Image: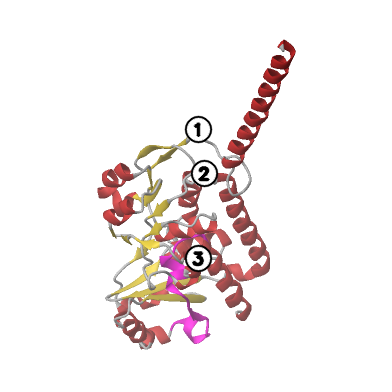
Amino acid sequence: MKLHKGVLLAGTLFIMLILGACGNSNQEEAEKGSNGQSESSTGYKVEHAMGVTEIPDTPKRVVILTNEGTEALLALGVKPVGAVKSWVGDPWYEHITDEMEGVEVVGEESQVNVEAVAKLKPDLIIGNKMRQEDIYPQLSAIAPTVFAETLRGDWKENFKLYAEAVNQEAKGETILNDFDERIDELKKTFGNKLEKEISLVRFMAGDVRIYHKDTFAGVILEQLGFARPESQDVDDFAEKNVSPERIPAMDGDIIFYFTYETGDGEAQALEEEWLNNPLFKNLDAVKSGNIYKVNDSIWNTAGGVIAANLMLDDLEQFMKEIE
C-alpha cells in the first residue's frame, strides 16, 4: 500500500512538471511579436525637444501629428491609429492614400483635435514643438509624448527621432542607408549635370517664394551635389512675398517650380500670371526649355522619407531630358 502511494505521488509530480513546462512555453509564445522575436518589457527613454520621455514598451497604438512623421512611420512599417490630415488630399496625400486606409484623422498639424487623440487611447504620441508646443501638456497627460524640434530642412534628423520613439532604430538606420546609397548612385548617373544651377520657385495664394537650401527640396539637392544660383545658395529657408522685380533671381540652368493649390484656384491663377510675365519668359532656363512643374506635395509639403524617394524619381527622369 505504501508503494502504491509513492508511485501515485511521483506520477502527480511528473504531471505537474509537464504542465508547468507547457505553461512557460505558451507564455513565451504569447510574448513574441509578429516578427517572431520576443518584445522587450523593460521600456526605454527618448530625449526630444520637450525633455525626456519614458516609453514602457514598444508602442502598438501610435498617433502622429505631422505629415513628415506619418511618412516616417509608414516607412518603418508602423501604421498609426491616428494622424493629422495631409495638407492636400481627402484626407491623405495621393501617394500614401492606400497605406493610410482605416487611420483616423485627428485634426491638422496647426490645429490638433486633442479629444480625438484621447479617444484613440494611444500608447505613444509623436508631435512637433514648432507646431504644437502649446498642447504638449495635454498630450503628455494622455500618453507618452515625443516632440521633434522643427520641420524644415534636414528631414533625416526627425526620422531618426521617430525611429527611436517606436523602438525601430535598426530598421530606421537601414532605410537611411538605402537612401544615401541611392544618392551616391544618382551622383554617378548625373555626372557633370550636377554643375547645372537649379532654381526652386513656389507659388501660393498671395505669395511667391524663392526657396533656398534650408528646405526639404534644398537639402536633397545639396546632398546630391547640385549647384544653386548664387542668391539661393544660402543656408536659410526662403525669400518670401517676392515682387515681379525679383523674377531675375529665379533664373538658373534649370527651374523647378511647384504650386500649393488648396482648391480655390488662387495659387494656380498666380502661377499662370507669373509664368506669362515677359520678365519670366525671358529667363535663360525658360528660353532653353529647362523649366519643370513638379508636385508640391512631393517636393515640399509632405516632407518625409517617402516623398524624398519620389523626388529622386522625378530628378532621375528630368535629368535624362537635359543636355
**Residue type beneath disc 1:** Thr
Q: Which residues are magenta?
A: 283-305
* Position of 87 relative to 66 (above/below): below
Residue 71, image x, y percentages: 48, 60
Tell me what residue is drawn at x 41 percent, y 46 percent: 124
Label 1 – label 2 distance at C-alpha: 12 Å
Please name which of the two marks, 1 or 2, marks the residue nearer to the observer: 1
- Please indicate whether residue 209 sits to the left or right of residue 182 in the image: left
Q: Nearer the viewer, residue 260 or 231?
A: 260
Q: Position of residue 257 (x, y in %)?
A: 44, 76
Outermost residue toward the left? 134
Q: Nearer the viewer, residue 185 or 60?
A: 60
Q: CA distance from mark 3 to mark 2?
A: 21 Å
On the question of residue 251 being in view, the answer is no
Q: Secondary structure at mark 2?
A: loop
Q: Which residue is mark 1?
A: 42
Residue situated in front as seen by the camera: 194 or 99: 99
Vertical order, 52 against 273 (above or below): above
Question: Which residue is labeled 3 in the image?
Answer: 99
Magenta span includes 299 = yes
Residue 181 visible in the snapshot: yes
Q: Quadrant of residue 45?
A: top left
Label 2 sits on residue = 167
Amino acid under disc 3: Glu
